[in-house]
Image: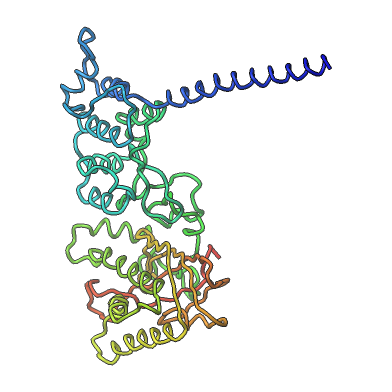
């Protein structure tokens, strides 16, 4: 009996010691994690020498004094310089430091695009700090975190804290401009490694798009020629078109001045075609979709397009169809030429309807055809497609270009 009591006491003692050591170790780990966050004052200590400011070591808070004198820190910025630094406030200080060192060189148009399209959580950032966040993004100093493949914006996560390791990296980029992230002309992150086999066919490769998106053949690569096709005459790759756009950037007669309008028409076309609800679809939906297709000078041709859309709407109501998209990603840098202009898109959607299986032409609107391989009702479906933009007007300046071939055909998908 005595041995049993001693044994039980020994087990109890072991448990007590285990709990005591656990209580000691856990705060130590938490403290270590907390120490990874950089304090505001310590970040300022990194910035001041990085921009070459002189420091009066005899002064109280010498680095802060130097930063205040240079305008990198402003009176009232912070109540407690011993507090942890958020990514938003890091962006404000980093941007001022960069402008002190390199000047304010961010293109106004790019800044506007980034504020409007590229930072998904920009509205969570105080209005007075949004421009600084957009500028450090534009400069490739802090570009946030991916929101997933095919998503054309990124999360800044402004209220996360900056770690000491990341602080040292971004401060080093003030002088090491070549080490900064590379952005496309429309503010998307460029990828420079693990490139697709045909990377030279594009002006750049984006971080958010997989190689399969780029390696899917262009339409002109599927054609059979009885002669040797010449680029710039018989076809034009996306890289070729990008060079033409750049060369004609200042030419008011260039058709490429309307390229953004073309992209918008494709986005709107797919937004309406892949978002419809039999319970709510109305004439506004019909009219908005119709605007994305080419407007003929011939009244009967125009009526035919409108009538086709109305007939489809009747079918949607009859079959109680609901289509919902989660991603419609139209990539401007994919614009190429094959007797007409085409632009590549990625879509993710699902379709719902009651009853038996239905023909796809009863579910989706297309003036050409749809061919979704493996489409399952109520399941998310993904596809990559090339949408044609063209005109029937031989003297067009590009302003009337609109959707001509709207086929969604999986025969061309996934680089096959």
How many badges with numbers are in the image?
A: 0
Q: Residue furthest front?
A: 1
| Spot occupied by residue 235 in the image (x, y as percentages of width and height) | 39, 68
Up the image or down, 96 lies above or below 145; here it is above
Q: Residue furthest bottom?
A: 300
Q: Quadrant of residue 159?
A: top left
Apparent side of residue 399 relative to residue 311 in the rendered image (left or right): left
- Residue drawn at 25 percent across, 24 percent down: 51
Depth check: give the residue in front, 44 or 136.
44
- Residue drawn at 22 percent across, 32 percent down: 96
| Spot occupied by residue 348 in the image (x, y as percentages of width and height) | 46, 64
Q: What color scheme is it?
A: rainbow
Up the image or down, 143 lies above or below 51; here it is below
| Spot occupied by residue 101 in the image (x, y as percentages of width and height) | 22, 29
Depth check: give the residue in front, 369 or 327.
327
- Residue drawn at 21 percent across, 33 percent down: 99
State the quadrant of the N terminus: top right
State the quadrant of the C terminus: bottom right
Q: Quadrant of residue 335?
A: bottom left
Apparent side of residue 118 relative to residue 21 in the rendered image (left or right): left
Up the image or down, 57 lies above or below 131; here it is above
Up the image or down, 179 lies above or below 276; here it is above
| Spot occupied by residue 100 in the image (x, y as percentages of width and height) | 20, 29
Depth check: give the residue in front, 398 or 181.
181
């Amino acid at each position: 009996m005595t041995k049993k009591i001693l044994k039980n006491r020994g087990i109890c003692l072991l448990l007590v010691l285990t709990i005591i050591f656990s209580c000691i170790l856990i705060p130590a780990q938490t403290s270590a994690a907390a120490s990874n966050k950089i304090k505001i004052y310590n970040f300022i200590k990194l910035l001041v020498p990085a921009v070459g400011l002189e420091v009066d070591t005899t002064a109280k808070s010498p680095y802060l004094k130097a930063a205040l004198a240079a305008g990198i820190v402003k009176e009232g910025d912070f109540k407690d310089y011993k507090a942890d630094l958020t990514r938003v406030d890091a962006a404000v200080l980093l941007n001022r430091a960069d402008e002190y060192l390199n000047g304010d060189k961010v293109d106004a148009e790019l800044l506007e695009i980034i504020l409007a399209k590229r930072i998904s959580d920009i509205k969570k950032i105080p209005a007075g700090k949004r421009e600084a966040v957009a500028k450090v993004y534009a400069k490739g100093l802090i570009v946030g975190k991916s929101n997933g493949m095919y998503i054309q914006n990124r999360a800044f996560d402004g209220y996360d804290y900056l770690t000491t390791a990341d602080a040292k990296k971004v401060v080093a980029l003030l002088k090491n401009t070549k080490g900064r992230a590379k952005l496309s002309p429309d503010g998307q992150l460029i990828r420079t490694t693990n490139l697709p086999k045909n990377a030279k066919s594009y002006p750049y490769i984006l971080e958010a798009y997989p190689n399969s998106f780029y390696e899917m053949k262009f339409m002109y690569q599927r054609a059979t020629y009885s002669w040797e096709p010449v680029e710039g005459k018989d076809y034009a790759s996306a890289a070729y078109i990008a060079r033409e756009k750049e060369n004609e950037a200042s030419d008011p007669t260039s058709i490429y001045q309307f390229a953004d309008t073309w992209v918008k028409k494709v986005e709107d076309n797919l937004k309406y075609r892949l978002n419809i609800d039999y319970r709510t679809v109305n004439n506004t939906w019909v009219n908005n979709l119709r605007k994305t297709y080419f407007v003929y000078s011939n009244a009967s041709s125009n009526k035919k397009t409108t009538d086709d859309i109305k007939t489809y709407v009747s079918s949607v109501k009859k079959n109680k169809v609901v289509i919902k998209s989660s991603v419609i990603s139209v990539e401007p840098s994919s614009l190429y030429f094959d007797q007409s202009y085409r632009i590549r898109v990625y879509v993710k959607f699902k379709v719902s309807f009651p009853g038996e299986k239905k023909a796809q032409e009863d579910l989706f609107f297309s003036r050409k055809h749809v061919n979704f391989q493996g489409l399952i009702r109520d399941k998310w479906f993904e596809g990559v497609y090339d949408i044609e933009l063209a005109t029937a007007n031989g003297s067009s300046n590009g302003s009337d270009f609109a959707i001509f071939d709207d086929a969604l055909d999986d025969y061309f998908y996934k680089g096959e």
